[in-house]
Amino acid sequence: MNENDENQADAPLTALVEYQVRTETTSVDQWLDVWQDRGEDALAGEAETSSYEAAISDQDPNQVLVFERYTNGRASVDAHIARPAHTTLMEVMGERKMTRRRVMSNHFADIDDYGWWSRALDDAPMRDADVLITLIGTRFASDEMKQRYIEVTGEHAAYCFDAEPDTLIYNGCIAQGDADRGPDIKTGDMLFVAAFKNETAAVKHRDDPRHVALQPRLAEIERERTFMRTYRSTGRGYLWRKKELGSE
């Protein structure tokens, strides 16, 4: 993706929206029960919502990340919000006072030809629970440094796709705005997203000799890690619904 094209209105978007459950009135399971109806509606009626999964924070088990992907950018987001099921979700959760607050919300545009978002071989949705999802925010000293990082890690992503079948998602995207809450995110920061089938897969990726050998090259790139968070999928939604174009 050209650095001048970071705000692409119709490019695929990843949305991160994290909520803190109001545990005085609602258990996390009860919150997920209500949310799951919305997830089923997205799966059945939103062809442009390619991912819509709820995941529990490892840092705070009372926080739920809704991990969303939209194939046609803002237009797909607007169509999602306009669904009657979305209005119902907001009304029910509001009436029952199920959510204490929103702790994160941001949108990220895909980086062209970088990594993959899906290992789907057919149209079967990915609905596994306990998938380990890792989010890493990175800010670069310059656009040149950012591009170098994308090139180096993009090469490694191609290797991981073949060598690590249990690395389910391995991709990155660019923040489209400054965060008004939650992690330190500024426009133009890179969000790296990885999903591993289990802890064993995550350790295999971390300790792979190619990954270890890559670290000195990455150390030469001036950057700051602004945050890192991990989550476990609930299987109440879906991490993908079918193979995405450009996902390999």
Image (tube, helix red, strand yellow):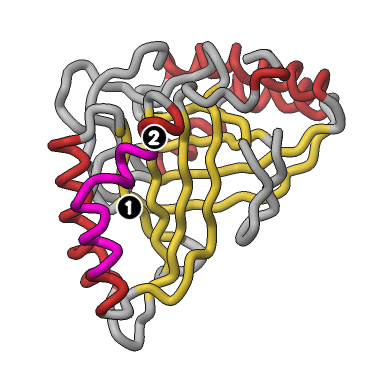
Label 2 Cα neighbours within 10 Å, binned few <14 / some 14-19 / many ≥20: many
Viewport quadrant of the N terminus: top right
Q: Relative to 50, does residue 186 appear above or below in the rendering?
A: below
- Position in image of residue 233 (x %, y %): 33, 50
- The alpha-carbon separation of the residues under discs 1 and 2 comes to 12 Å
Residue type (three-letter) at the residue carrying disc 2: Arg
Residue at the spot x=23%, y=28% of the render? 47
Residue at (21%, 61%) from the top-left corner? 88
Question: Residue 150 at what x, y percent from top left?
Answer: 67, 19
Q: Indicate left or right for 147 with 25 as reference.
A: right
Tag 2 residue: 69
> Quick one: 131 or 224, which is closer to the camera?
224
Residue range highlighted in magenta? 78-91
Q: Quick one: 174 or 95, which is closer to the camera?
A: 95
- Please tell me how crowded label 1 is: few (under 14), some (14-19), or many (20+) other residues with Cα within 10 Å: many
In reply to whether residue 241 is colored magenta, the answer given is no
Q: Secondary structure at mark 1?
A: strand
Amino acid type of the residue that numbered disc 1 sits on in the rendered structure: Ala
From the viewer's perspective, is 191 left or right of 12? right
| Disc 1: which residue | 54
* Magenta residue check for 79: yes
